[in-house]
Amino acid sequence: MGGCGRRGRDLYVSRSEENRPHSAVTKGTQWLLTWGYVVAWGAVIFTLSAQPDLKLPESLPSFSDKVAHFSVYGVLGWLWSRAVRINRPAWVTLTVLLSTFAFTGTCGLSDEWHQMYVHGRSAELLDALADVCGGTLGGVGFLLWLRFRADIRTRTSGGVTEQLRDPSDPAA
């Protein structure tokens, strides 16, 4: 009886492997295509914040640096939410948004802390606030985009709901 049970488990394992979609994308490539964008954009932010005397043109309004912080971290929030949604599809929307808020807030605060030690730069609480607001709104934007896409697909497929897939997700 022990042999039969073992054989049954082996059969189950082989069947589950047969039913998996065959893809040339390795786990390393999949990680790179999801989290790699987050890491790369974080490196861009770090590089920009390490520049001494980085200033916007004088012709722009005085609050333009806040708009720049908001925009740059909005992209980071979009990329973070995308990566989390791909790697943690069971997470509810609120969990994805809270993780985006926490991640972009932590990155924004660490960026301002880093700027305290860069010659010609200073740390500003309003910049950190713009970072977390932009990052969170970027995450909201990504989730709304997914929702909008799902609504379009539902309408075009005659009411049959399809699973949400990111077009740039290699596992999709």
Image (tube, rainbow, N blue to C red):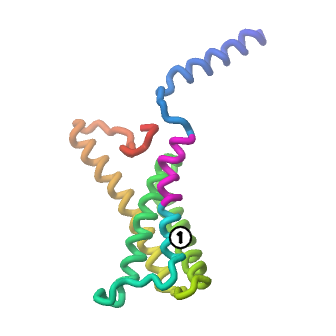
**Residue 135 falls inside the magenta stretch:** no
Magenta range is: 28-40
The structure residue drawn at horizontal position 45% and vertical position 64%, both measured from the top left corner, is 76
The structure residue drawn at horizontal position 51% and vertical position 52%, both measured from the top left corner, is 36
Residue 3 sits above or below residue 158 on the image: above
Q: How many marks?
A: 1
| Residue 21 in picture, x, y percent from top left | 47, 27
Residue 94 sits above or below residue 1 on the image: below
Q: Secondary structure at mark 1?
A: helix
Instruction: Give 49 or 167, whichever is nearer the viewer.
Output: 49
The structure residue drawn at horizontal position 62% and vertical position 21%, both measured from the top left corner, is 13
Instruction: Give 133 or 30, whichever is nearer the viewer.
Output: 30
| Residue 12 in picture, x, y percent from top left | 61, 19
Residue 34 sits above or below residue 52 on the image: above
- Quarter that holds the C terminus: top left
Query: Residue flagged by tag 1: what amino acid is it?
Result: Phe
| Residue 148 in picture, x, y percent from top left | 29, 53
Q: Is residue 88 left or right of residue 78?
A: right
The structure residue drawn at horizontal position 48% and vertical position 52%, both measured from the top left corner, is 83
Q: Which residue is mark 1?
A: 46
Q: Is residue 79 left or right of residue 8?
A: left
- Quarter that holds the N terminus: top right
Residue 106 sits above or below residue 82 on the image: below
**Residue 31 falls inside the magenta stretch:** yes
| Residue 142 in picture, x, y percent from top left | 38, 58
Residues packed near mark 1 inside 10 Å, few (<14), some (14 to 19) or many (20 plus) = some
Magenta span: helix, strand or loop, mainly? helix
